[in-house]
Every structure is written in C-alpha cells, then in structure tokens.
Image (cartoon, grey):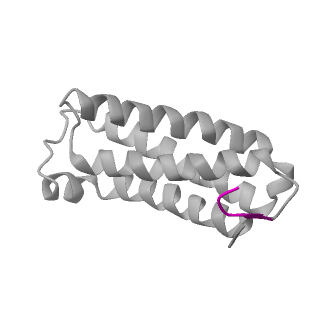
Amino acid sequence: MKINWKTFFLIAALYDGLLGLVFFFLYNTLFPLLEITLPNNTSYIHLTAAFVFVQGVGYWIVFRDPDGNHGIVKLGVIYKSIFAGLAAYYWAIGELLHPIFGLLGILDVLFLVGFILFLMNPQSQSLPAGR
C-alpha cells in the first residue's frame, strides 16, 4: 500500500478548512447540539476557528506543491502536536470541554504521523505504508 501525498494533503486541507468554517459559522447550532455552554464572548470561538481554517489553507498550499512547501508541513507538525497534546492533557485531568475534542485530537495524531512520514521522505509522492 502506498500513500499518495497529494491526496493526503487534500484531505488535511479539507478537514481543517471545513472544521474551521463549521466552528466559525455554525457554533451557535453546534455548541448547543453538543451541550456545550456558549462563552459570554464569541471571540474565543472565532479566533480559534479562523486559525484552524488558515491551517487548512496551508495544507491546500502543500497539496498544490508538496515538494515546495516543507515549511508549512513542519508548522503543521507543531500545530497538530500542540492540539493533540492539549486535548490529551485535558482529557486525562477530566477537564476536556467535550469528548468531540478528544476525537479531534486523535485525528490530529493521525495527521501528525502522516506529516512526519512525509517529511522523512519528501522527495517521494508515495511511500510504502508502515515504513
């Protein structure tokens, strides 16, 4: 089995781009659906959602030119590590806002593994899985 890096980064772009848009525009529906109390100031949601959307744009740029955008992938490693780490920490101490953020942290770990595999062999558009 081989990894098609362009497809991988397209999925990453769509994932973070759509996630950012959903949290930015649909938080008023999403939070009550998840039984999460809305903050008294929506800037917390908008600032975070906009950042997630921008990460999606970055992965779109990588999708368009994987070999020319290793720096964006390195930034993605940092971003995914921090989000997954914080989600795990708050999950472990019982203060995670909602289990959905734990799931998002797990998904970020999967993307993180892919980013690291890509950076280990950036010249290849496909890499044997499990290597």
Q: Which residues are magenta?
A: 126-131
Q: Quadrant of the N terminus?
A: bottom right
Q: Does residue 45 appear left or right of residue 64 in this picture? A: left
x 33%, y 51%: residue: 103
* Above or below for 56 versus 93: below
Q: Position of residue 92 (x, y in %)?
A: 25, 31
Q: Is residue 49 above or below residue 129?
A: above
Residue at the far front: name it. 131
Q: Is residue 131 above or below residue 80?
A: below
Q: Which residue is located at x 80 percent, y 56 percent?
A: 66
Report which quarter residue 49 is drawn in: top left
Q: Is residue 55 magenta?
A: no
Horizontal side, residue 79 vs residue 1: left or right: left
At a point 31% along the width and 45% down the height, the residue shown is 102
Farthest bottom residue?
1
Q: Position of residue 54 (x, y in %)?
A: 57, 47
- Residue found at x 38% / y 30%: 86
How many marks the image carries: the answer is 0
Residue 93 % position (x, y): 22, 26
Rendered-image quadrant of the C terminus: bottom right
Q: Nearer the viewer, residue 95 or 46?
A: 95
Q: Is residue 127 magenta?
A: yes
